[in-house]
Image: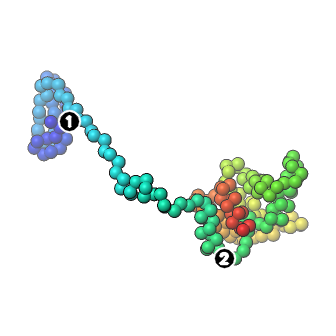
Amino acid sequence: MLFCPCCGNLLLVQQTLVEQQFFCQTCPYVFPITRPYKNVTTFKSKEVDDVLGGEEAWKNVDSTDAGALAFQRAINYQGEHQNFGDSERVREHVQQHLKDIPHPEKLSADDELYYMFSIHDVNKDGHLDGHELREAFVDHNEDGKQTLSLDEIIEMVDHVLEEDDMDNDGMISWEEYLLSRKYHSA
């Protein structure tokens, strides 16, 4: 007996001075427990149904990867531009930052990409957030004056995050950076 026969609510167990008893919290029903009470219920595991047709139904399904995302962006793309600057300026920028650090004399294009990302990943979390992107876009002329206004830099950061942040986490991961470079160099 697990449910009250009067109101249908679950019965609880309470200890009295003499015995234990089932009681209902909502009505005055009480049932004394005079012997050990044991109720064993065995459950049968449900068999998995192939609601979508099983393995055979998935055999000819199209699949996608990050390249498909780049392709979709290419369809929506209007105009030619580089989100992270042209290659020559990137090369000069990397060389400027590496002048006091031991590094190979000649860097490959892949090395330049890695160093460019690493230089600006200030907190070394493997992502470029808005603050790190802002600092990456700050450029100074020969007089040491900033060549872009803060509004222009913010617009550039917003553009990069909108276009290249594929998982919408507000940061550019190394993978997203590589896809962007590959996409814009194509």
Residue extending farthest to the top is 18
Image quadrant where one finds the C terminus: bottom right
| Disc nearest the viewer among 1 and 2 | 2
Residue 161 appears in the picture as rendered: no
Q: Which residue is drawn at 27% across and 40% down?
A: 44
Please, which colouring scheme is shown? rainbow
**Which residue bears the numbered disc 1?**
12
Q: Quarter of the image holding residue 145?
A: bottom right
Residue type at mark 1: give it: Leu
Total count of labels: 2
The amino acid type found where label 2 is placed reads Gln
Residue 12 percent coordinates (x, y): 20, 36
- Side (left or right) of 35 relative to 171: left
Image quarter (top left, top right, bottom left or bottom right) of the N terminus:
top left
Q: Quadrant of residue 108?
A: bottom right
Picture residue at 40% right of the left edge, 54% below the top:
54
Q: What element carries label 1?
A: strand
127 or 144: nearer the viewer: 127
Residue depicted at x 72% and y 63%:
181
- Residue at left offset 66%, top offset 56%: 175
Q: Which of 108 and 79 is in front in this view?
A: 108
Gap between marks 1 and 2, in whole Å?
70 Å
Q: Where is residue 149 in the image (x, y as percent from the top left)?
A: 75, 70
| 181 sits to left or right of 11 | right
Residue carrying label 2: 78
